């Protein structure tokens, strides 16, 4: 990686009408992260110190998102949509003040990698003044063609302006370029809009650079990496590529995925080695899992932590704030929200634990429910260590069960249970000896009378 300072200018001014959405295109997400976030994270990884994001008018949501993801990024508004060069020029203040490398990217190519950006920067370090990231297109329709002579890129010809011979060129413009700051302002100022779209094309800087006697070259990336998003079908195609990258990454890090294509990750999923993940598991945002844990089939996890050796699922749901301790068991049809389940505790069947603590080695019987919400406020349930909660218990919060407490099955617990005590909170059972047989005889006789009548 080169040592010069780097500025990234990210074009995000387009609304993206083909998305048919009320929000700006680059706010749509892949792996739970807005498209613009993917590009910002790639430029950061490539050693970029500063980012300038070009936004369109009335995109407060986008500005807020950029600020949240990259607090030191500066947003510039392109008030009128007059072309890609015009968009870059909205950040004039940023590039005029900058000395070093300048990367220009579009925010709708979220799969771009830091490695390709590093290649662009390396080419600048090797003496190029302008570098274009190209790719070999399967179908080059619609893309600008890269015209190269003896290693020098002489022009980018937009599809509609290309001659028949030029249209045969398969090397296309990804829309990602790198400039040395020395010539940036001069090149942009020279761009004109005398084309049939009457737009200021950033791609015209290539011919201008040739006219100024500058060195212009290309480096390449795979077509998949520079795949752009214009509609929701392309959004899904990019999501698939992103998911495959995540799956590959985790498997090489020592995570077993029994059916990789059925497991979905978030951009921020953290998994240690030696974890087993069964089929059909979804990791939403903010999940971390420690080594030796097993996530069984059909589980959904979000903003949750699973400690080493724990088992979750099948069919478990960990909601925000779920913290599963070492070796703990969360079983089928169990939902955990904002609750700590301590080391070795077991919550195995058909249970809701919310706003609670389950102490070490406690066992929660099937069908247990923490009643945490009264329609206005949430309340806490505290279950100590080594407790045994009988099946179908209802724990009405706020309530505390001290260490070693025991609740009888079917109890509705509304009062605290002291240490090592048994709480029984259900109607008493009485047995009427022989009454079942008498009732059967009576009912049989009734039925016979009815039949005789008809
Ligand atoms: C552009 C390139 C083309 C390349 C292709 C790759 C130009 C002239 N052409 O074509 O060579 O092969 O990308 O996908 O650059 N934008 C603004 N403000 C504007 C205009 C555009 O922010 O005034 C943004 C758009 O939101 C978009 C990006 O710049 O993200 C590219 O613009 P677009 O009009 O889509 O260019 P293409 O025709 O795709
Ligand atoms: Ca485009």
Image (cartoon, rainbow, N blue to C red):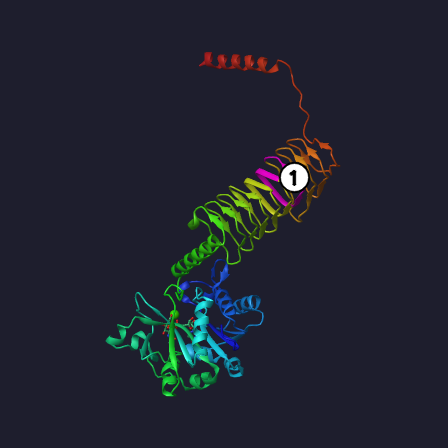
Q: Residues within 10 Å of mark 1 (few under 14, many from 20)?
A: many
Point out residue 216 in the picture as x, y percentages from the top left corner: 38, 80
Q: Main secondary structure of the magenta part?
A: strand
Whether the residue under disc 1 has CB within 8 Å of ligand 1: no
Task: Say if residue 81 shows up in the picture.
Answer: no
Q: Magenta span has 47? A: no
Q: Nearer the viewer, residue 358 or 54?
A: 358
Residue lying at 29% horizontally and 78% vertically, measured from the top left: 161
Point out residue 327 in the picture as x, y percentages from the top left corner: 60, 43
Residue lying at 57% horizontally and 38% vertically, measured from the top left: 348
Residue extending farthest to the bottom is: 212
Q: Magenta span has 350? A: yes
Q: Image quadrant for the C terminus? A: top left
Point out residue 343 in the picture as x, y percentages from the top left corner: 64, 43
Q: Nearer the viewer, residue 246 or 92?
A: 246
Q: Nearer the viewer, residue 164 or 370?
A: 164
Point out residue 297 in the picture as x, y percentages from the top left corner: 48, 43
- Give the magenta part as a residue range: 346-366
> Within the displayed image, which quadrant is ligand 2 positioned in?
bottom left
User: With 16 as the anchor, is 327 left or right in this view?
Assistant: right
The residue under label 1 is: 361
């Amino acid at each position: 990686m080169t040592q010069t300072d780097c500025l990234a200018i990210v074009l995000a001014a387009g609304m993206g009408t083909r998305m048919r959405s009320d929000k700006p295109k680059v706010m749509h997400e892949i792996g739970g992260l807005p498209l613009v976030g993917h590009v910002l994270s790639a430029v950061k990884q490539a050693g970029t110190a500063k980012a300038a994001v070009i936004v369109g008018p009335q995109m407060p949501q986008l500005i807020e998102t950029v600020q949240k993801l990259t607090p030191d990024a500066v947003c510039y508004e392109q008030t009128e949509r007059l072309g890609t060069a015009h968009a870059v020029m909205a950040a004039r203040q940023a590039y005029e003040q900058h000395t070093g490398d300048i990367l220009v990217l579009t925010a709708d190519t979220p799969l771009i990698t830091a490695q390709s950006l590093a290649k662009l920067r390396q080419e600048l370090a090797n003496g190029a003044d302008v570098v274009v990231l190209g790719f070999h297109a399967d179908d080059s329709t619609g893309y600008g063609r890269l015209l190269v002579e003896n290693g020098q890129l002489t022009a980018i010809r937009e599809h509609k302006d290309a001659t028949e011979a030029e249209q045969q060129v398969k090397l296309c413009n990804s829309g990602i370029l790198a400039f040395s700051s020395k010539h940036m302002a001069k090149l942009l100022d020279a761009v004109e809009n005398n084309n049939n779209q009457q737009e200021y094309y950033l791609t015209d800087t290539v011919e201008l650079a040739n006219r100024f006697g500058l060195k212009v070259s290309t480096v390449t990336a795979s077509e998949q990496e520079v795949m752009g998003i214009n509609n929701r079908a392309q959004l899904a195609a990019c999501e698939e590529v992103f998911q495959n990258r995540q799956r590959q990454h985790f498997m090489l890090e020592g995570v077993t995925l029994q059916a990789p294509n059925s497991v979905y990750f978030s951009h921020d999923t953290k998994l240690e080695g030696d974890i087993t993940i069964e089929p059909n598991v979804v990791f939403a945002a903010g999940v971390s899992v420690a080594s030796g844990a097993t996530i069984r089939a059909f589980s959904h996890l979000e903003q949750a932590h699973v400690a080493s050796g724990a088992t979750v699922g099948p069919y478990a749901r960990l909601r925000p704030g779920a913290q599963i301790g070492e070796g703990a068991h969360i079983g089928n049809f169990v939902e955990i929200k904002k609750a700590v389940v301590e080391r070795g505790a077991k919550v195995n069947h058909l249970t809701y634990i919310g706003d609670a603590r389950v102490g070490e080695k406690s066992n929660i019987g099937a069908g247990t429910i923490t009643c945490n919400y009264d329609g206005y406020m949430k309340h806490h349930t505290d279950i100590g260590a080594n407790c045994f909660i009988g099946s179908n218990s209802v724990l009405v919060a706020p309530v505390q069960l001290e260490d070693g407490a025991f609740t009888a099955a079917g109890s509705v617990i509304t009062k605290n249970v002291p240490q090592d005590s048994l709480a029984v909170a259900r109607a008493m059972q009485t047995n009427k000896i022989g009454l079942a047989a008498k009732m059967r005889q009576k009912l049989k006789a009734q039925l016979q009378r009815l039949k005789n009548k008809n």
